[in-house]
Amino acid sequence: MIIFITSFLTLINCDCIPYGVRLSLGHYYSTLNDINNYITLTFNSQNICLDYVVQIINPISINNIQVNDYKLLNMTDIYKESQNAIHYQTYIYDVKLGQFNGLFEGNQYTFIIYWENAIVAGPFYFQIPSKSLNYSSKFIIMGDLDSNWNLNTSKETFDWFTNQINKTMFYDGIIYLGDMAYDLEDDNCQVGDNFLRNISLFTSHFPFMLTFGNHDKGQNEEFVYIRQSFATPRISDYDNSIKYNDFYSFQVGHAYFVQFHPYKIAYGNKDETYFNYTLYQMESELRRIRQHENTSWLIVYNHYPFYCSNPDDGFCEDHYKKMKLFEDIFIKYNVDLCLAGHQHTYERDEPLAYNKIAQFDKYENNIYTNPKAPIYIVEGAAGNDEIMPKDIYPPKFYTKFQAAGDGLGILEIKNETHLYFEHRMSINDSVVDYFWILKTKVIPDDDDTDKNSISIWIWILIGIVVLLLIGFIVYCLLKKKQKKTYDEFI
Ligand SMILES: *[C@@H]1O[C@H](CO)[C@@H](O)[C@H](O)[C@H]1NC(C)=O
Ligand SMILES: *[C@@H]1O[C@H](CO)[C@@H](O)[C@H](O)[C@H]1NC(C)=O
Ligand SMILES: *[C@@H]1O[C@H](CO)[C@@H](O)[C@H](O)[C@H]1NC(C)=O
Ligand SMILES: *[C@@H]1O[C@H](CO)[C@@H](O)[C@H](O)[C@H]1NC(C)=O
Ligand SMILES: *[C@@H]1O[C@H](CO)[C@@H](O)[C@H](O)[C@H]1NC(C)=O
Ligand SMILES: *[C@@H]1O[C@H](CO)[C@@H](O)[C@H](O)[C@H]1NC(C)=O
Ligand SMILES: *[C@@H]1O[C@H](CO)[C@@H](O)[C@H](O)[C@H]1NC(C)=O
Ligand SMILES: *[C@@H]1O[C@H](CO)[C@@H](O)[C@H](O)[C@H]1NC(C)=O
Ligand SMILES: *[C@@H]1O[C@H](CO)[C@@H](O)[C@H](O)[C@H]1NC(C)=O
């Protein structure tokens, strides 16, 4: 009997052990500027477990947050009418951390999760990025990662993270470029469930800012599992009049990041309403940022590369043509970097405009000075069993550098004028490629038509002034002559 009771308790206990602990940047960094949501902490449990306590520790105080809100993700119900029945349910807890929990931007903290007075997760260290323009930020850039470990393809990247955490490295976030787990909803969502458990190694320390890839869509193209499982600072969280809730943007230091999700466009589905709305969201946001924000750097990311070198993938042939209207506005609003995954390699391209190398003042010692169009990066090499090319692809005319094998990028926004990017191999942390973007003038030139129209007005103005002056002189001379004649006459 005693044995029975103990094992019963252990069972309950097990169901209440949180898993998939993950952080994401909250609505402080979106336009909502909500100081009570710097970070959203998300975790799962197998059962409904009330009264979790999240404890936030800093050198001078300890704050406890009682957690009683949860949502049920019932995949069984979502697919109950479908032919691909799934049997899976999990409970998800979203906890907003902010100033009312005694947190302040730019500071570092530790959190622990308690249940029934026992530590059930943590301690985990983390930091709150700052929006202050003097803040230098540092992000990890990666995509296309699984954790199936049949072939151990992603193991090097997990080991890399273990090392970073062992050294207490801080990052402001992970920009995750789509495709995860391979695939989230496979095997009754067990693949996704294991993935959440596995990545909490690093998502419990570094806010995870994702975009959705084609492998993340699930059984019916609705992206249900990923949408419910990961928090992002979507405006639609607060404003439910927004039609499609896939778009978000956020600011840290001198950088503005804009995420979009053009799955239906990439896969040729001619959903014009969707295309128009996504384009409209992108254009309004880029215009707003350039007109009303004082940030220097504009970085756009999604899963599908506009440019890439894989000769066997149609995307690398003509995706930029499908995305031309987006490229128009990236150029118009001076986007600096475009990040994507999808290809399972690393690739850095020249600054590009409409499949041509764009102008820049100079390129010397891996430093681009004032490029006139975005630089395109593919970071899809974090590691997965689907396919990891052994070698790089034949370079295109715009391919600046490629690397095959597990790796990830580090992006550092140093200040208003200096952006740094490097690609590291997961296996030995060696930097195999790097570059800087340097802006000598932070406010970009107006485009040429504007400049011409301004100078035409100036010339017209000068012309009018000169004419008036000549008129005035002639008038004075005539007047003088008249007076003289008059004087002579007298
Ligand atoms: C999940 O959905 C299935 C199918 O609709 C239902 O039978 C089950 O009771 C639901 N689970 C919970 C916990 O509500
Ligand atoms: C950056 O600016 C903030 C105020 O905006 C100030 O509190 C902070 O000390 C500054 N940090 C540095 C490193 O100058
Ligand atoms: C994967 O790694 C594990 C743990 O290091 C090891 O036991 C296993 O043999 C490896 N599998 C392969 C296919 O290399
Ligand atoms: C962490 O680093 C210490 C030395 O600083 C080392 O002894 C330990 O094995 C490392 N742990 C992991 C998991 O890498
Ligand atoms: C990932 O999940 C699988 C299945 O639970 C497990 O076998 C593997 O050890 C996990 N890997 C890590 C790094 O935790
Ligand atoms: C999408 O935009 C184009 C160009 O502005 C317009 O011609 C078309 O009617 C729009 N389609 C829809 C469905 O709104
Ligand atoms: C941008 O800078 C101007 C001038 O310093 C300031 O008035 C304005 O509030 C700033 N805008 C933002 C969004 O910080
Ligand atoms: C910006 O950062 C670069 C690289 O760290 C540094 O050399 C430069 O002096 C900084 N500029 C300003 C204005 O702080
Ligand atoms: C790191 O690993 C890469 C990929 O295997 C290799 O090309 C490089 O030479 C290694 N660098 C060092 C310093 O060991």
Image: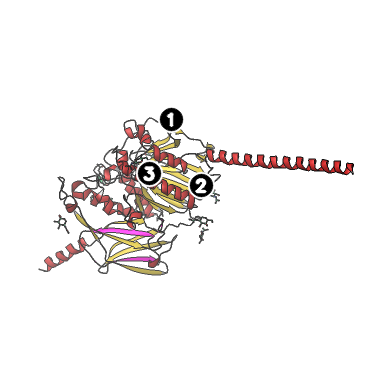
Side of 37 relative to 197 (left or right): right
Distance from disc 3 to disc 1, alpha carbons, whole Å, reads 29 Å
Q: CA distance from mark 2 to mark 1?
A: 26 Å
Which residue position is annotated with label 2? Answer: 418
Cβ of mark 2 under 8 Å from ligand 8: the answer is yes
> Residue 168's x, y, as percent?
40, 56
State whether residue 426 appears in this view.
Answer: no
Magenta-highlighted residues: 28-57
Graded by Cα atoms within 10 Å as few (under 14), some (14 to 19) or many (20 or more), the crowding at tag 1 reads few
Q: Is residue 83 magenta?
A: no
Depth check, front residue: 130 or 455: 455
- Helix, strand or loop status at disc 1: loop
Residue indicated by mark 1: 397
Q: Are marks 3 and 2 in contact (CB under 8 Å)?
A: no
Q: Residue 181 location in percent, x, y?
A: 26, 46
Residue at screen point 37% across, 69% down: 62
Is residue 34 covered in magenta? yes
Mark 2 Cα shell of 10 Å, populated few (<14), some (14-19), many (≥20): some
Q: Secondary structure at mark 3?
A: helix
Is ligand 6 closer than 8 angstroms to the Cβ of mark 3? Answer: yes
Q: Amino acid at mark 2?
A: His
Q: CA distance from mark 3 to mark 2?
A: 29 Å
* Mark in front: 3 vs 2: 3
Quadrant where the C terminus is found in the figure? top right
* Residue linked to disc 3: 279
Q: Is residue 63 above or below residue 356?
A: below
Tell me residue 29's x, y (percent): 41, 56
3 or 2: tag closer to the N-terminus: 3
